[in-house]
Amino acid sequence: MSQKKLRANAFYSGFPYAHDTYLALSKASDGKLYYILSSERLDVGGQLYSFDPQTDATTFLADLTEICGEKGRRAIPQGKSHVEFYESEGKLFFGTHVGFYEMIQGMERLPQNPPEGYGLYPGGHFLSYDLHTGAVARLGLMPDGEGILSMAMDTDRRQICAISWPTGMFVHLDLTTGILRKIGPVSERGEAGEVGKDYRVLCRSLLVDPDTGIVYLSNAEGDILFYDPKVGGPLQVLDDVNLRLDYFGRYDPTQPGSMGYNWRKVLWSKREGVAYGIHGNSGYLFRFDPKQPKLEVIERLCSLPSKRSGMFDQFSYGYLGLQFGPDGDTLYYLTGGPVICDGKRLEGERQIAKGGAKGLENLHLVTYQVSENRYTDHGAIHYSDGAIPTYVNSIAIDDLGRAYALARMQTSVGEIQDLIRIERESDANGL
């Protein structure tokens, strides 16, 4: 059965150094998309933009290093953001991360020996952006010069929780008091640890139960941990439910190159009052009810070609592009699919020691209507010249139900990552 073709319509934001961005793309209540383009450079920070789906107009908003008050400081800059935007009282809340790394023992690490003339990374900032005035406020600094890897916000109670990179320190920022507390490590020494001993890949997605304010996260061993901001630390392990499931695969949590038993992305369903999540490497969708607690595997949400091949996809950590559409019932998921050459599946590297593509793969848009248990693979996505969008780990859905992401593309300034809109080949009005 042939599938419909999908087109990736590319938008160039004007940043020639744009590198891979993870998660930092969200739709706000004004209907606009807000996103950050990352930078690996020492002299340029990440850039904040907005995009208006009604006019296709892109607007530059800010340089991350500058709004953090570090422009001209000659320290390793605020190169990127690794978190979604959370909206509360007319403001967007987010955090910054390091984009310049040092290769230590064959792995990308937080720089310990910065280039001559530069200081160490000062740490990630918690920030707010006023949707009406454009004013930016600095709300707190991640301790110990670490970046903000994962973050979630209880927008009603005005509480932010986050995980630092690379050591995996869990922190709690109370916006009502301005107090930031270090709660404790998520798992051993996180991604600063020694491989085979205390190395643990860190959770990229935190979950807030809006009914209780309790925050949930996973670790590489497959535990589900929780933290109640009203009570304080330490982190606690949820009894009687975990992610160590045969369907997800088998992992050595001391080794890099996968997310282990961590969930890749998890999000709250307002319609049902439960969470839905994806295990990155296996592509299995699950339903998590923290109040029972109970976790149920639902469906392998990867592409149809991946299902038929029976193999994991090429991105070593799995995919972060999972989001509910405007109806609150339909999940949109951007995932991989095997590239077939001469009738054979194109194979990549067996293992890589980081989150990245082990080989070339197609990009597919999959939807899953929860109430009807309806899975649909809408097909592979290509640019107009036939090229494939790659390194896609973000998604936002506009008011018309059209999907957007940040993806690698070829431009007149070389290969960069920028905004794309996914449309039917013959229908510019989207999906």
Image (tube, rainbow, N blue to C red):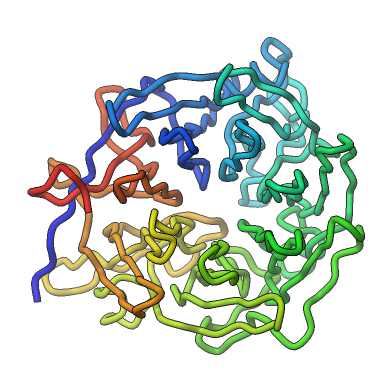
| Residue 97 in view of the camera | no
Q: Is residue 281 left or right of residue 8?
A: right
Instruction: Name the residue at 74% across, 51% down.
Output: 163
Say which quarter of the image contains residue 180: top right
Seen in the picture, residue 270 relative to 148 is either above or below; the reply is below
Q: Quarter of the image containing the N terminus? A: bottom left
Q: Is residue 167 left or right of residue 83?
A: right
Instruction: Name the residue at 38% across, 29% down.
Output: 51
Seen in the picture, residue 87 relative to 274 is either above or below; the reply is above
Instruction: Name the residue at 70% across, 63% down.
Output: 211
Where residue 274 appears, as percent x and y from the top left, is 59, 72
| Residue 104 in view of the camera | yes
Q: Quarter of the image containing the C terminus? A: bottom left
Q: Nearer the viewer, residue 353 or 266?
A: 266
Where residue 227 appears, as percent x and y from the top left, is 82, 63
Where residue 362 appears, as percent x and y from the top left, is 27, 59
Q: Is residue 56 left or right of residue 166?
A: left
Where residue 63 appears, as percent x and y from the top left, is 57, 19
Q: Nearer the viewer, residue 306 or 109?
A: 306
Q: How many marks?
A: 0
Seen in the picture, residue 98 relative to 14 is either above or below; the reply is below
Say which quarter of the image contains residue 112: top right
Say which quarter of the image contains residue 158: top right
Q: Nearer the viewer, residue 66 or 72?
A: 66
